[in-house]
């Protein structure tokens, strides 16, 4: 048993402490004795998505995102196949937008996305910035996750479920009260800050999903999460939803 | 008509300076902060051209320092060099670097009738405010230290910050630039065909250091001109180092002021080679970044024709500003206070910490007010992972400030054992905890708005050490 974590374009998509998500996934495997390794896949390098257990796609600046989009387009079919087969994916900010149909800039230019998820993004007049709390449901249990959002894009979902409902903050577009997107084992969110270390129930859910996909025993022993819970509580209280 | 307009401007200037000065006195009287921005704000409200009117009177030149890290230290060093050369200087020494802070510096120096008698203005200017400040006070020399990721929610992204500065520089074709050759993001700013020459400074060899955080923070892996990857012969810290593009002709420019024989323990020193000579620069404070600041100040000093020998002596007695490696003593236990505000600076602080040869107690204070950056996700770009197998000499990390808990989470995921992570959000209790800890010295790191309160508590508990005495002492960590 070995979980393979794929960090796509770690040098290009590395805004806002994104690597914290990869660190958290690995740490929570390690603390339970589940062997896990990370593959840092750069532009132009080979990767077989089927062999991967967890794929992380972060956000970058506009310049960096353009450099990477072309490279990812070539991999779209392979990625689609892996996603349909249950590959666990976490995509944040720019990575999230990229999985949709397109991104429309302020000037009206359409930048095509991979079209893997039924959603699209439109650049708004000002950035949506601030701390955010979202209620999500995992295996029928509801959790309050916290993070920080900073995005100009407004994302609208088609026939696809959101990750959760905004308790405080803006979310996908600041209008419909929805945050992120969820399809099979793909999780998308505007919460960086980063998301996984601060919200262990979500991290553990992703680890379990990865284990299940391989037909491995997936019950996880509980960890001491007092620090994480305290950090989460501080933010929920501050946002008035604690 | 013109006469009336002129008289009107004079009256406005008078009231702007008068009320600005009144604000300085009032804020001193009420002890409301240090009064380093509010007077400028008041004066600018009354007379929007007040800065233009005051800055226009500078006799010999205006020197601006911008960039992400080292602005305050570099600017204070330059001001010290200019004063030492017998010049009258206006400077915003306390680090208030928005247009309001710059204006305040002039108001403090002006007579009631708005007369400023000074040879040089030495101004530290916030990256995002640089274009606006330049529109009021035209710089003759612009020093750019480095570009790192900093407080993203305020500025958007690093790329747009650099774009701001580039377009502001295009409007200053005759200004001389002093640029860090080792930072590709800075070095790219020398546009071909500029009238004003660029002076580059940098280190001509790799600094050998026992420990090193910051292997992960590399802002510029790709060429700013063609997008191909940059090849590095070596890194100093962050993306600073000796680089060249694998595709086009962009590469680290040859430094006009080049530091060699670098030494960063027990204070710091290097041999500076410059056109026409060489001289050793000693600093009472450690850290490679301080040596970078000194080299920048030295290069700017050469441009205003300061004597190298004189500059070397002035730098040797340089006293750090608040929170720039300030040294205190609590019952004989040395305590060092340092500002942290972005991954590159934090990594440098960690490196100094890891060079310790005795037991340490560490405090990390993280606030998330506007001046700190409301988004603290940058903590995940700091290379705390270096602590995983090197925390032996550190007794504990007291995490404090508004985001104490989250700092604790960060250390936990970096591999610091839980029993070494103490979360104490109250600053006073946290400072007492490190001062009374079992270590032989204490090391305190704080973000901007946590720095002043921590300093105040420290100052109440401790004796502050005079810097030139520190130069003769072995360095604490």
Image (cartoon, helix red, strand yellow):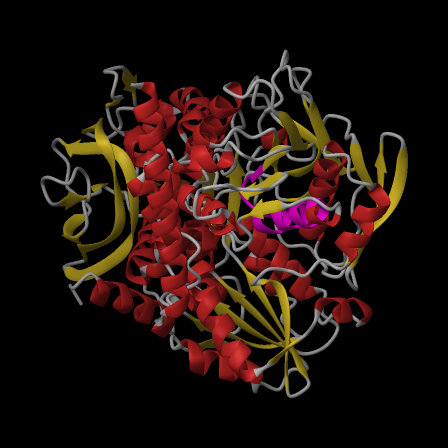
- For residue B65: magenta? yes
- Where is the C terminus of chain B found, in terms of image quarters? bottom right
- Nearest the eye: B214 or B42: B42
Relative to B59, is A55 on the left or the right?
Answer: left
**Where is residue A136 drawn, in percent x and y?**
18, 54
Where residue B136 sits: x, y (%)?
44, 31
In the displayed structure, would residue B61 be above or below residue B100?
above
State the residue in front, A179 or A23: A179
**Number of numbered callouts drawn:** 0
Locate residue A62, reporting x and y percent. Answer: 40, 27
From the viewer's perspective, is residue B22 above or below residue A101?
Answer: below
What residue appears at the point 37 percent right and 71 percent down from the top-left corner?
A227
Comparing B23 with B80, the one in front is B23
Q: Residues in magenta?
A: B64-82
User: Residue A164 vs residue B364: left or right?
Assistant: left
Occupied quadrant, residue B63? top right
Camera-nearest residue between A130 and A147: A130
Vertical arrangement, residue B1 with respect to residue A167, above or below: above
Q: Is residue A97 left or right of residue B118?
A: left
Give the overall secondary structure of the magenta segment.
helix
Q: Residue furthest right?
A: B277
Residue B445 visible in the picture = yes
In which quadrant of the rendered image does the N terminus of chain B lie? top left
Splitting the image into 4 quarters, where does residue B268 fall?
Answer: bottom right
- The quadrant where residue B21 appears: bottom left
Q: Is residue A96 left or right of residue B393?
A: left
Residue at the spot x=42%, y=41% of the render? B99
Q: Residue at x 62, y 67 (%)?
A: B326
Q: Is residue A43 magenta?
A: no
Q: Inspect this view and state whether residue A87 appears.
A: no
Using the image, determine if residue B338 lies above or below residue A73: below
Image location (x, y in percent) of residue B375: 36, 51
């Amino acid at each position: 048993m070995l979980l393979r974590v794929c960090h796509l374009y770690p040098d290009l998509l590395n805004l806002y402490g994104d690597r914290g998500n990869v660190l958290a996934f690995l740490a929570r495997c390690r603390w339970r004795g589940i062997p896990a390794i990370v593959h840092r896949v750069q532009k132009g390098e080979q990767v077989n998505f089927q062999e991967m257990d967890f794929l992380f796609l972060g956000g970058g600046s506009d310049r960096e995102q353009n450099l990477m989009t072309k490279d990812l387009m070539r991999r779209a079919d392979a990625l689609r196949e892996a996603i349909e087969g249950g590959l666990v994916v976490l995509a944040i900010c720019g990575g999230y937008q990229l999985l949709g149909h397109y991104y429309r800039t302020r000037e009206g230019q359409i930048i095509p996305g991979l079209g893997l998820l039924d959603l699209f993004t439109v650049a708004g007049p000002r950035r949506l910035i601030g701390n955010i709390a979202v209620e999500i449901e995992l295996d029928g249990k509801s959790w309050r996750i916290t993070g920080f959002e900073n995005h100009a894009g407004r994302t609208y979902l088609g026939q696809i479920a959101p990750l959760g409902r905004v308790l405080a903050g803006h979310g996908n577009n600041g209008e419909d009260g929805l945050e992120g997107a969820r399809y099979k084992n793909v999780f998308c969110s505007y919460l960086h800050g980063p998301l996984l270390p601060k919200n262990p129930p979500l991290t553990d859910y992703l680890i379990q999903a990865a284990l299940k996909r391989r037909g491995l025993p997936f019950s996880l022993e509980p960890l001491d999460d007092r620090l994480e819970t305290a950090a989460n509580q501080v933010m929920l209280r501050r946002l008035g939803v604690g | 008509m013109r006469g009336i307009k002129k008289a009107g401007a004079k009256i406005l200037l008078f009231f702007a300076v008068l009320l600005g000065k009144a604000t300085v006195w009032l804020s001193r009287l009420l002890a409301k902060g240090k009064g380093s921005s509010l007077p400028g704000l008041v004066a600018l409200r009354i007379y929007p051209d007040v800065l233009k009117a005051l800055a226009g009177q500078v006799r010999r030149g205006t020197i601006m320092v911008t960039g992400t890290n080292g602005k305050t230290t570099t600017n204070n060093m330059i001001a010290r060099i200019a004063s030492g050369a017998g010049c009258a200087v206006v400077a915003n020494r306390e680090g208030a670097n928005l247009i309001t802070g710059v204006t305040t510096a002039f108001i403090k120096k002006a007579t009631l009738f708005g007369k400023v008698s000074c040879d040089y203005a030495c101004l530290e200017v916030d990256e995002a405010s640089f274009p606006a400040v330049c529109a009021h006070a035209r710089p003759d020399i612009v020093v750019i230290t480095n570009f790192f990721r900093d407080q993203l929610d305020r500025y958007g992204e690093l790329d747009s910050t650099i774009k701001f500065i580039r377009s502001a520089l295009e409007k200053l074709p005759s200004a001389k630039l002093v640029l860090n050759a080792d930072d590709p993001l800075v070095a790219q700013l020398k546009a071909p065909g500029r009238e004003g020459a660029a002076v580059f400074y940098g280190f001509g060899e790799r600094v050998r250091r026992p420990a090193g955080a910051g292997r992960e923070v590399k802002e510029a892996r790709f060429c700013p001109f063609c997008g191909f990857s940059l090849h590095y012969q070596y890194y100093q810290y962050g993306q600073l180092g000796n680089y060249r593009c694998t595709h086009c002709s962009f590469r680290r420019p040859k430094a006009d002021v080049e530091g060699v024989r670098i030494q960063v323990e027990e204070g710091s020193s290097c041999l500076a080679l410059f056109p026409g000579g060489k001289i050793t620069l000693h600093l009472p404070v450690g850290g490679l970044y301080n040596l970078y600041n000194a080299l920048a100040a030295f290069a700017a000093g050469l441009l205003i024709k300061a004597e190298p020998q004189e500059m070397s002596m002035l730098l040797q007695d340089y006293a750090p500003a608040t929170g720039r490696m300030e040294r205190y003593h609590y019952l004989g236990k040395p305590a060092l206070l340092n500002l942290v505000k972005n991954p590159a600076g934090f990594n440098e602080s960690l490196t100094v910490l890891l060079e310790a040869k005795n037991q340490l107690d560490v405090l990390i204070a993280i606030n998330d007010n506007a001046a700190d950056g409301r988004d603290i996700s940058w903590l995940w770009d700091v290379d705390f992972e270096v602590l995983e197998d090197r925390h032996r000499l550190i007794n504990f990390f007291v995490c404090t400030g508004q985001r104490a808990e989250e700092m604790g989470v960060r250390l936990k995921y970096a591999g610091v054992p839980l029993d070494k992570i103490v979360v104490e959000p109250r600053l006073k209790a946290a400072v007492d905890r490190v001062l009374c800890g079992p270590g032989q010295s204490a090391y305190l790191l704080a973000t901007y708005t946590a720095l002043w309160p921590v300093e105040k508590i420290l100052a109440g508990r401790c004796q502050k050490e005079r810097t030139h005495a520190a130069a003769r002492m072995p360095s604490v960590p």
